[in-house]
Image: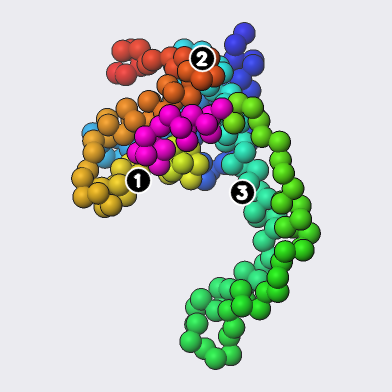
Amino acid sequence: MVHNESKPHSMWNPKRTCYLTVDGKYYCYKRWDDNAKCEVTQRLEVGKDLSLELTIMLDESDHGMDLQDRYVGELRDPVFDAKESSYKADPDNEDTVDPWDTLADKGGSPENVLFSEPETENPEAALVRKVIEENCTDAQRDLYYEHFGMRKQLEEIRQEEAERTEKLVSQAAMTKRKNKIIDKVAKVLGVSRIKRSQHNKK
């Protein structure tokens, strides 16, 4: 059965606005509902609303983001964070020093040596990156990195874009832009984005 092959690789992360359910049957994401004036969770059924291949790719992306957050957390120095918070609270205090100014050259630190080693890029991830960089418009590229990379909600991106451009695009236009990105990625991966049926739109 197709759902048995779509068990989530990523773990539940409340910071993410999208996720694959534990049973692997639905890929969910939060979006702004203009009519209800609130955030709602959209559920896409794997194998019906969303292809298995694209679901796996999205789940792998979620997993990668979770790992990045975990590594950042593990490398944080609580003492350094406390000093930084203290400095930011009262930067004019002569007795406090910006902890960043006290750091020596970290070029030879174990952390930098570890993370400076070249990593083998997943072939499919390389294809996706190439599509985003070469086949997408500037607006689509920005949306990809902000929505899938920075995990911003479409409504948040829409409002920020309006502040920059002084032009508020519709929520439908943002969704269409996102779907165009997915279509381009799906095409290079040899899969198709399964369109939502009229029944699911109700």
Residue 19 appears in view: no
Q: Earlier in the sequence, mark 3 or mark 1?
A: 3
Which residue shows up at 42% across the image and 21% down it? 183
Residue that sits furthest to the bottom in the current view: 94
Which residue position holds label 1? Answer: 156
Which residue position holds label 3? Answer: 69
Q: Which residues are magenta?
A: 127-142
Against 132, residue 23 (above or below) is above
Q: Amino acid at mark 3?
A: Asp
Question: What is the C-alpha distance between the residues marked 3 and 2?
Answer: 30 Å
Against 197, residue 154 (above or below) is below
Q: Earlier in the sequence, mark 3 or mark 2?
A: 3
Residue 21 location, x and y as percent?
55, 27
Which residue shows up at 58% across the image and 85% down it? 96
Against 56, residue 174 (above or below) is below
**Left or right, residue 122 beside residue 86:** right
Q: Which of the labelled discs sits on residue 191, or is there none? A: 2
The one nearer the camera, 13 or 165, is 165
Quadrant containing the C terminus is: top left
Residue 45 location, x and y as percent?
48, 18
